[in-house]
Image (spheres, helix red, strand yellow):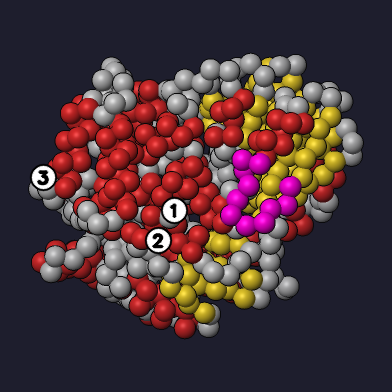
Amino acid sequence: MSGTCGGEMDSGELADTISQLDGWNAETRWEFEVADGALGTTNPSVDSNGYTTWSDGKHAGVVYGAVTNLDEFGYDERALFTAVLSDPVTIAAELEGEFLIACYDGAEDRHVVVTDKLGARTCFYATGGRFLYSTSMNSLVPLLDDPTVDLQAVNDILLMGHMWGERTLLEEVRAMRPATVLEVADGERSTTRYWKPDYEAHGGDSDGYFDELADRYEQAARRVTGTLPEEVGIWLSGGLDSRTTAAALLQNASPGHLDRLIAYGYDANPPTEDNPKIASQIARELGIEYLQIPLTAETFAEDIERVIDVTDGMLQWNTTANLSPSYHIERDVPVLMEGVQGELIGDHLLRYHFDESRSIVETQFASEASASKKQVNNLLTEDVDPVRTFKQEAERSPETTHRGKVLDIHYQNYYARAGLESNRVMRDRTGSRSMQVDGDYLEWCAKMPRYYRKGSFPLSHHVFKSDAGGVPYGTSIAKLELCRRVSPTLSEIRYERTKTKPARPYRFHVAGFVGNVVLSRLQSKATYAGGQLQDFWIRDTDTFVHEWVSQYIADATDRSFFDADAVEAVFERHMNGSNNASMLARITTLEYWLQNHLD
């Protein structure tokens, strides 16, 4: 899967740990060991710009990923790592890009590990005993004396389908937070947050806000293209995020980089063939090749266990299913990318979540939980507070306003533990980049006024419950405005979710989304807030996915902390027509991971 590891390891342990990080393609390995410390990395050989290593015999460093603004400081490899070791907090705040930096000072027996501003490349570390870290928690398990399951983490997976805060499935291991420097000296571990945006809402006019948003977006594109090889792949759908990203990359490509962009797609989200049709139109307008990759119960049968392994059992497998076609791309594309996430500009934290009549804990529950407290409690035999992690995050945030706390918790958790976590599947296949990990762009996203976020129809929460509070508008004003500014021509190609051209006024998109969903339901088609591909796969008794889920559900009924009757009931209701794929994926993700990595 590629990755980085290190700490207090001997040469044999370092080699064994790195071997567990190897990905799908040929990998280039690098190892360093001196005195009592070690670090190493393994990366796809086709993406030579996707990692950096350095050593002078006593000191060493790894950039797993790419710093996108090094040329702005004139740093070479030695200067970068020397600066990070000398003043990690100050230097880290200056760096942009998706990366994990790990350094070791053999003269002082000191480790420094740095996450980027969104924590896009997760790093796990042992909280006690000898210091150990890795981008894969699985690889740390053999080095731990007596690892134990964190039941609060089990609760969190069942509640959300992903993790939150620093928790992992193991009591002895924690995840580093975004924008954090972890230093270990004399056996003492300390963490420092080196960056956070200003969350105060922009007070100027809308044109001024969106013009600046587009400028910063394109600056992020210019920065990241300077780290790209000649050939890059991008997942392209009929949505707004991927088309806007593709256009920005092509318009801002640096000389000698990104000579060829290839678009890949699949029929999902929902599986009605609309996404491939619209993506093909977008690709023709951009002048790039579009290739459709199969995503079926048969192709995913080959990948279901691998995607759980790659994400350390901490992301429900039906979330990672949509990136599993990465394994079925025939050519060895050096880098794969996704569209910049619309969640940053109003497609995840919605207007509803900024209602100050709700507590910060209630707001987190509304934005993240997709199961009820009662359902989670029924599934567990142990007494666990369903919202304990939300309470801890609310207490931890230093912000003093409701808006500030909501956004701060979001920036510190959502992308590192959910939104960008599935990108580990792409990195298992080849190199990857995340354009949105750019401080200047993130600063401006954090200032977005509430009105530009996705809303919901007034009073609709009385008849329909959703993460938007009621019947949602379908998209955010900000996503449409960004698309119009970055690529006016692509704004004339209809948007899959609303069946309306992005160039048209917002009210048409609000109506278009509702009309799209209603019509699809009348025609018994897959649609938003309805059954998805994985629901159908599990219900089809002829598929391997059904067989696999059945097996691990049966095994889960023997797990001491699962209530057997409640687990069986989730499966039975699904087979009788309810759409329970998400909860079934959570239970089976946990059971598979525990059997194969801990039991």
C-alpha distance separating marks 1 and 2 = 7 Å
What residue is disc 1 on? 303
Tell me: residue 63, above or below residue 38.
below
Residue that numbered label 3 is attached to: 462
Q: Is residue 41 left or right of residue 179?
A: right
Quarter of the view holding residue 3 = top right
| Identity of the residue drawn at 38% across and 24% down | 152
Marks 1 and 2 close (CB-CB < 8 Å):
yes
Choose mark 3 or mark 1, whichever is in front.
1
List x then y, in percent, for residue 115. 62, 39
Q: Mark 2, mark 3: which one is toward the viewer?
A: 2
Residue 299's tag is 2
Magenta span includes 354: no
- Dot 1 amino acid type: Asp
Q: Could you tell whether 417 is left or right of 62 in the image?
A: left
Mark 2 and mark 3: Cα distance apart in space: 41 Å
Which picture quadrant has residue 7?
top right
Marks 3/1: CA distance? 40 Å
- Percent x, y of residue 176: 57, 32
Q: Is residue 21 magenta?
A: yes
Note whether 298 is above or below 88 in the view shown. Answer: below
Q: Which amino acid type is marked by label 3?
A: His
